[in-house]
Image: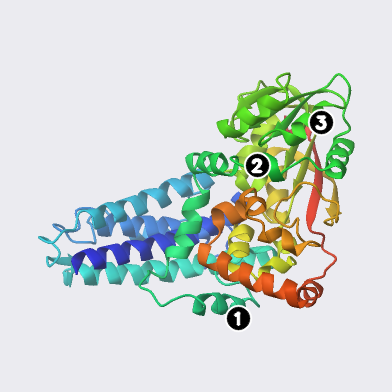
Amino acid sequence: MEDNFLESITQQFKYYKMLGDKTFAQLSDEQLFWQYNEASNSIGIMVKHLWGNMMSRWTDFLTSDGEKTWRKRDEEFDADIRTRAALLEKWEAGWACLFAAIESVNADNFHTVIYIRNMGHTVAEAFHRQLAHYAYHLGQIVFLGRMIKGNDWQSLSIPKGQSKAYNKGKFAQEKRREHFTKEFLDEEDATDSPKSMKAKYDKIGLNYNQTRRADPYLTQRMLHLLELQTDGLYLDIGCGTGNYTNEFQKTKGQFIGIDPSQKMLDQAKQKNAAIDWRIGTAEATGLPDQSVDGIIGSLTIHHWTDLTRGMQELHRVLKPTGKLVIFTATPKQMEGYWLNAYFPKMLHASKVQMPSFAVLTQALQTAGFEIQTTEKYFIKPTLQDLFLYNGKHEPARYLDPAIRQGISSFSDLANQEEITEGLAQLSKDIEQGNIQVIQEKYANEDGDYLFLVAQKNNTKL
């Protein structure tokens, strides 16, 4: 019983921490410390309070009162945390203290009576008391985040209008015993660390070249927007197996390709040994200051571990007046994909990790870029690069496992049960002609993807 309880309570605490992490990721530094009025608390203040509570409650919690004599609770509501780094330091320290306390519980001490302000609790009661307290404040944090972001908020639960599809997927599965947080925490674990990023792309890279060929239109459009010069040195960040880098190199200039996956770079080198291929990330390119004339980032920014830090690094290596061309999709655009009708959980996971246009704009401006232009891209029937929405006009493409393997949403974020169920329904709808109804339902003018051109702002050098 003790083991089951501890495992369950740990999962629930991790779930609420995840809600905070994903809220912080959507907000600018300024927004983290915004207050509705002088009497209200900012997210920064609430994090400081949670930190103070956690450190007091869980330090030596089996042998000392949970309200420590050294705690200064009133000061937790002073607005003196002013940077994201300081906020995250307290956030992580508090949770680390809590999880260490859970780890210290065993069968021998599980029934110990512990005290909070001289009030006796069982270990289970103490954890439940604080779970409710932390959930209360995390609800406030998420609410504030949603209020600040408005229409740009990326939902952390079932998106509006998708409850029916979500429930359909759930009830299509066999009854089983599984913690309700598993699907959410699995999404979080799959996208966080540089190590997991490397593993993800090592996995995708196995068959990447079979389906992810450079599309001629996208190649020419990105080069046109970059305004390539013959004698320039350019960077393709997140280059993968180098399909686009190799095509870029055939026109003008010299290219460097940087990617975190050695397996992908090994394939890239086989295409063109003359290109400078390097292991690295957007956050740590290893390039000298002001060393490249322009940068292209195609379908990569949603895989960076820190969007703002990545933009700051690109700003650092870019020469004055150099341009950055980004090809991406926003969560709002992805809401218009008819794939939502068949794979709602997968699309939700994909949308959560995609920076909204507002978040992207904030990261660029913080780093010192000015956005020059944006351009919508609608999937063309002739598309040769088979990324996520490649089957917009050719739904049967998604029935091919080789195509799905080259798409990170299918190969890394997807729930296998949902994929099996969704593919079966998709196949049926294609056969019966119902797919046209679904496609028409999702038709929109928001664009399927987005080109964005930003220029280095020299006033911030």
Q: Position of residue 54 (x, y in %)?
A: 32, 57
**Residue occupied by mark 3:** 248
Relative side of 415 to 244, left or right: left
User: CB under 8 Å between callouts 3 and 2?
Assistant: no
The answer to whether marks 3 and 1 mark residues whose Cβ atoms lie closer than 8 Å is: no
Which residue: 74% across, 73% down? Answer: 431
Mark in front: 1 vs 2: 2
Q: Position of residue 291 (x, y in %)?
A: 73, 21
Image spot of residue 44 (x, y percent): 50, 56
Residue closer to the observer: 248 or 64: 248
Query: In what element is the residue under mark 3?
Result: helix
Callout in the foreground (3, 2): 2
Q: Amino acid at mark 2?
A: Tyr
How far, Cα to Cα, is label 1 from label 2?
Answer: 34 Å
Q: Is residue 79 visible?
A: no
Q: Mark 2 = which residue?
A: 208
Q: What secondary structure is found at the residue carrying circle 2?
A: helix
Q: Earlier in the sequence, mark 1 or mark 2?
A: 1
Name the residue that disc number 1 marks: 164
Q: Amino acid at mark 3?
A: Phe
Instruction: Indicate the amino acid at tag 1.
Output: Lys
Q: Nearer the viewer, residue 294 or 138?
A: 294
